[in-house]
Image (cartoon, grey):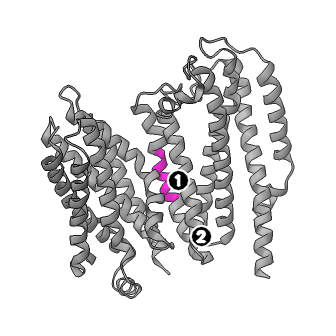
Amino acid sequence: MTEAKNYMYKPWWKITGVLLLIYTFTAGLLLKVPALPALQETIRNLYFHVCMWFAMMILFTISVVNAIKYLRTLNIKYDIYARQFSIMGIVFGILGYITGAIWASYTWADPNKPAYSSFSSIARDPKLIGAAIALLVYFAYLILRDSIQDMDKRARVSAVYNIFAYTMLFPAIWILPRILPSLHPGNEGNPALDVKNDISGNMRMVFYPAVIGWTLLGVWITTLKIRIALLKEKKMMS
Amino acid sequence: MLEVRQQYSFYGILLYIGATIFVLFNAMDTPESKVWNGLFWVIQLFVCINAVAKSFLQESRGRMLYFYSITSPANFVLAKLLFNSLLMLAMSLLSLLLFTLFLGNPMQKAGQFVGLVLLGGWSLSLVFTFLAAIAAKAQQNAAIMAVLGFPIIIPQIVLLMKLSNAAFAPLLTISPTTVLLLIALDIMVILLAVILFPFLWKD
């Protein structure tokens, strides 16, 4: 418990997160960006849209690590962690879809038709499918959790499903987009991590801090929810 | 195992396959190969859910306790996986046969497609066997099977569809890396099942 308390109650990383986000918003909206065909100024959405997915993946990963920890220790605390981190991951995933939809309506959608009529062709994109699978899996995870009454059993079964589903997610998110044709950028190599020929150095100066900033914000919100959940737990026990 | 003891459930699945495909037969004439392919895999998916889900959901508590006392969880889950794989392979062949009988035969490379069907049936049965073990622990388990399973199975279904489209078109070739990827996924599912099942087992 002490170790977890340490990081949860220390203010330094929360301040870092807020500072990085302030930097993201100012630098992301003011700094020069390369004017690419079709993208133009919408490329600034990179600091928000792509970061949402990074934050989602990181939060889901934290959730799975906690599920593994739970199975190793059978300490109910880790189960609460896993649940809250997965919920926050879902929130970031939905935000990622919203920012992506705004971006796509300017770049992918057919300008001669209303934006929603391009939906079915855009939704076929493997990256969107992969992300949809991730969200569905974690919705299913939450439903599975709530359908079991007994607390220990619930924690154990949902931890097992969490690990199983996460491991099966790898092909969906990291392999499928490389096999199927896609309009989405970042098909060759490691999207957004390729140093040589991906985004310009100027943008990377904003992008990496933005990823860290958004992730820290997500972790912060989650720790608040974990603290509430732990308090409720304590009340129930006493 | 269960199907040998309760033979009606085995015949039930056979009838399920037959009835579904007969409904499809009445609903449409010979569909073109893409539609055929899509229908075939969706039917496979539902057959698999119905066939495999029973293996855990219909085991009574007492019998599980009996298994618990005579064997280790890893052995038990491996036996279940093996049995369900065999069951699903037989079912896949049966539904393939009925499909070609009723809905026409668009296969250009029949041998390869049969291989794919077997591989697909195997993948489906492995994933759903493990999910049935999870779902058996929850209430309203039949509905939850689908909710838990569909998102997980989508990548495999997409890969299988892609491969089987290649089996229908004379010019496309089936990529061996994708086949290997599917096999690797299956092996991963087996490993995960062996590692994780002991945690589901004790009650």
Q: Is residue A220 left or right of residue B141?
A: right
Instruction: Report the amino acid beneath label 1.
Output: Val
User: Nearest the camera: B55 or A27?
Assistant: B55
Instruction: Report the amino acid beneath label 2.
Output: Ala
State the extent of the magenta-drawn residues as a range: A163-170
Q: Name which quarter of the figure residue B180 lies in.
A: top left
Say if the magenta span includes residue A207.
Answer: no
Whether residue A68 is visible: no
At x 62%, y 17%, the residue is A39
Helix or strand or loop: what does disc 2 sit on? Answer: helix
Q: Position of residue B43 (x, y in %)?
A: 30, 53
Checking the image for residue A155, the label placed there is 2
Taken as a whole, is the magenta stretch helix, strand or loop? helix
Q: Position of residue A96 (x, y in %)?
A: 64, 38
Q: Name which quarter of the figure residue A69 lies in.
A: bottom right
Checking the image for residue A98, the label placed there is none
Helix or strand or loop: what does disc 1 sit on? Answer: helix
Say which chain tag 2 marks. A
Checking the image for residue A137, the label placed there is 1
Q: Position of residue B44 (x, y in %)?
A: 29, 54
Q: Is residue B76 left or right of residue A89?
A: left
How many numbered marks appear? 2
At x 63%, y 53%, the residue is A62
